[in-house]
């Protein structure tokens, strides 16, 4: 029996490409998961993503994951044509800098939710040496089409569209699953790659003119709705000829992510004592650290049992100090101020929860 025909036949599929990409990723230190299945809750069907690769780095008390969701496609007879036009990066109706990330660290989520943070992330990545992975799109891709490589005849956009949809929905699934799956302190940043073993062609429309140009990479910003919520993602089309250089740049992206999320976490705590919104995020953690200990000190000093459920913090500008306040008679905070054990307990909690090492004092809260 001639078994060589099976070897020749499998070469026409995308599985060889998928295996080569997985091997290249492994060689450069990426962990790779192949053929991951997930449920498409919109179409009520099971979808598959070819590759999910990630690198992880430890930063302070949390892990930083840089994730690549990858679609692998091969086409011997057709060219992938990306139809595009001039881009307006100042268009107020477009988001050219989508950032898809997730963290169970409230400090990082708070920072990421601030206006302009996503565009700041892109600018900082460039400063940290990331070249093409997050480059500004040079054109606006508005459609795509597979076209016969010999005749130029248009076919359809089925394979390209399928690649894009699979990437977008896989990303949505992974982000939605993380809150239940990931308990250790973590932050994830996602990138969508459509790697194709076929010619990539840019067809640029300028007025009545159409200019064809072979390319090796293109950034496509996709607008879509999942679970009735509008969102935007960046998909990068990549020709296999530049794969090794591409992976090197994503190595740089991971290194930059570790630095950037560390700085983002640090900036959350910078001046936190003066910001009631940031203080409030971790007030329950602070209460847990001191509530029982302060209760015992009050009882030992005054033989009083005080409800400390709502113990809180505020900044007193004229004294340049934090105030630890709770509802009580005036003699209670007076007794705590100057008590070494109470002050040591609160100082340790402020350092642990808020990284604050400055002055503080106790004060009775006014109930009305």
Image (cartoon, rainbow, N blue to C red):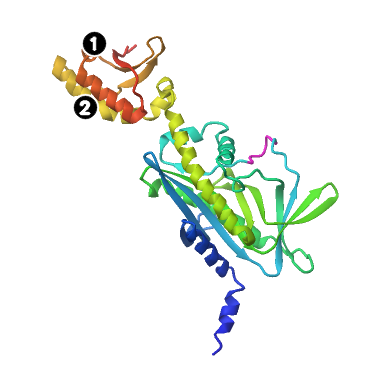
Seen from the viewer's position, the closer of residues 161 and 24 is 24
Residue 260 in view (yes/no): yes
The first of marks 2 and 1 along the sequence is 2
Instruction: Residue 200: give x, y in percent of width and height.
Output: 70, 59
Label 1 CA crowd tier, 10 Å (few <14, some 14–19, many 20+): some
Instruction: Residue 86: give x, y in percent of width and height.
Output: 76, 44
Label 2 CA crowd tier, 10 Å (few <14, some 14–19, many 20+): few
Q: Main secondary structure of the magenta part?
A: loop
Q: Is residue 249 left or right of residue 342?
A: right
Residue 37 in view (yes/no): no
Q: Which residue is mark 2?
A: 292
Mark 2: secondary structure: helix
Seen from the viewer's position, the closer of residues 165 and 340 is 340
Q: Which residue is mark 1?
A: 334
Is residue 92 magenta-colored? yes
At horizontal 57% and vertical 45% (from top left) the residue drawn is 130
At horizontal 59% and vertical 83% (from top left) the residue drawn is 5
Q: Quadrant of the C terminus?
A: top left
Q: Quadrant of the N terminus?
A: bottom right
Range shown magenta: 91-96
Instruction: Residue 261: give x, y in percent of width and height.
Output: 47, 38
Seen from the viewer's position, the closer of residues 233 and 68 is 68
Q: Is residue 246 left or right of residue 30?
A: right
């Amino acid at each position: 029996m001639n078994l060589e025909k099976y070897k020749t036949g499998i070469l026409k599929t995308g599985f060889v490409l998928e295996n080569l990409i997985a091997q290249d990723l492994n060689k450069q230190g990426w962990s790779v998961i192949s053929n991951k299945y997930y449920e498409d809750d919109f179409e009520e069907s099971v979808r598959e993503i070819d590759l999910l690769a990630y690198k992880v780095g430890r930063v302070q008390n949390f892990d930083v994951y840089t994730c690549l969701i990858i679609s692998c496609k091969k086409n011997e007879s057709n060219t992938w044509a990306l139809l595009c036009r001039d881009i307006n990066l100042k268009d107020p109706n477009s988001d050219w800098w989508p950032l898809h990330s997730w963290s169970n660290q409230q400090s990082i989520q708070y920072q990421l939710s601030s206006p302009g943070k996503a565009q700041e992330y892109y600018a900082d990545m460039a400063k940290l040496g990331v070249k093409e992975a997050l480059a500004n799109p040079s054109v606006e891709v508005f459609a795509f089409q597979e076209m016969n490589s010999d005749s130029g005849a248009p076919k359809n956009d089925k394979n390209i569209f399928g690649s894009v949809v699979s990437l977008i929905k896989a990303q949505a699934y992974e982000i939605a699953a993380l809150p239940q799956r990931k308990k250790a302190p973590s932050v994830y940043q996602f990138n969508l790659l459509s790697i194709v073993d076929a010619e990539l062609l840019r067809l640029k429309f300028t007025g009545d003119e159409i200019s064809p140009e072979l390319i090796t990479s293109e950034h496509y910003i996709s607008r879509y709705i999942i679970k009735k919520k509008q969102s935007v993602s960046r998909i990068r089309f990549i020709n296999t000829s530049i794969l090794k250089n591409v992976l090197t740049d994503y190595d740089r992206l991971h290194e930059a992510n570790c630095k950037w999320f560390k700085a983002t976490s640090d900036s959350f705590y910078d001046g936190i004592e003066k910001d009631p919104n940031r203080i409030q995020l971790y007030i329950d953690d602070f209460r847990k650290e001191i509530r029982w200990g302060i209760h015992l000190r009050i009882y030992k000093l005054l033989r009083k049992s005080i409800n400390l459920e709502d113990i809180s913090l505020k900044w007193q500008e004229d004294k340049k100090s934090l105030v630890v306040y709770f509802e009580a008679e005036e003699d209670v905070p007076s007794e705590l101020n100057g008590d070494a054990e109470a002050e040591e307990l609160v100082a340790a909690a402020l350092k642990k929860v808020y990284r604050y090492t400055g002055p503080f004092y106790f004060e009775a809260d006014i109930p009305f």
